[in-house]
Image: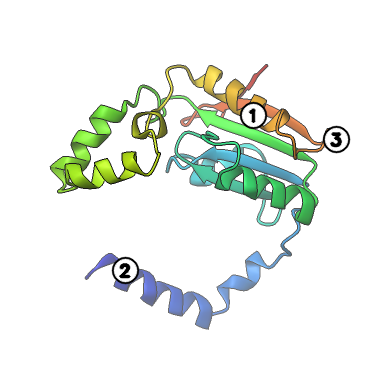
Amino acid sequence: MPFIKQIMEFNKNFVDSKQYEAFDTTKYPNKKIAILSCMDTRLTELLPAALNLKNGDAKIIKNAGAMITHPYGSVMRSLLVAIYELGIQEVLVIAHHDCGMRGLKAPQLIKEMMDRNITQDKIDTVKNAGIDIHEWLHGFENTETSVAETVKIIKTHPLIPPDVNVYGFVIDPKTGKLDRVV
């Protein structure tokens, strides 16, 4: 059975049996925090558990590497909406050890794209649109440095109010141990 069919069957049962009632909350985060974290599957349940977060406590934004790659991209827009519309007072940037973005190089990713039938013409189209594909697809060399850079982008952004506190952390994806990046 295709996985999407399993998802749809489970979802129907979930809704029909009103299991959603256990997750009822508002759109306003109880703890007034937003978290930018990596999309790593090991953090799906571990991160909230390690921080004692329940449904409704925080806004969690996930992407590859817990990075802000552009100060006016979707991650920053999400943070601004969270601050101005949803009452966020603190932002936590939480990356993790053993991240797939650490050491990621654009040429390696481009080769994998081409191996999966993305043509050079399509790659050139991205380049011709003004995107530096090598800069856009790069990872980072040091997790702590990447967190510090992302924290700096948020703190120095002209639209982030000075009363919003921003902190950086690295979490162990096995134990949940959190280390602060200063």
Tell me whether the residue at label 1 lies in contact with that at label 2, contact meaning CB atoms closer than 8 angstroms. no
Q: How many marks?
A: 3
Which amino acid lies under the numbered mark 1 shown in the image of this protein?
Ile
Measured as percent of width and height from the top left, residue 110 is found at 24, 35
Q: Give the vertical position of 2 relative to 33 (above or below).
A: below
Would residue 127 be seen by someone viewing this image from the given angle?
yes
| Gap between marks 1 and 2 measured at Cα | 38 Å
Q: Quadrant of residue 108 in the image? A: top left
Residue denoted by label 1: 153
Which quarter of the image is occupied by the N terminus? bottom left
Which amino acid lies under the numbered mark 2 shown in the image of this protein?
Ile
Give whichever of 68, 26 is nearer the camera: 68
Give whichever of 96, 61 is nearer the camera: 61
Task: Identify the disc placed on residue 4.
Answer: 2
Measured as percent of width and height from the top left, residue 112 is found at 20, 38
**Residue at left offset 44%, top offset 40%:** 42
Tell me whether the residue at label 3 lies in contact with that at label 1, contact meaning CB atoms closer than 8 angstroms. no
Which quarter of the image is occupied by the C terminus? top right
Residue denoted by label 3: 163
Give whichever of 181, 176 is nearer the camera: 181
Where disc 2 sits, the SS reads helix
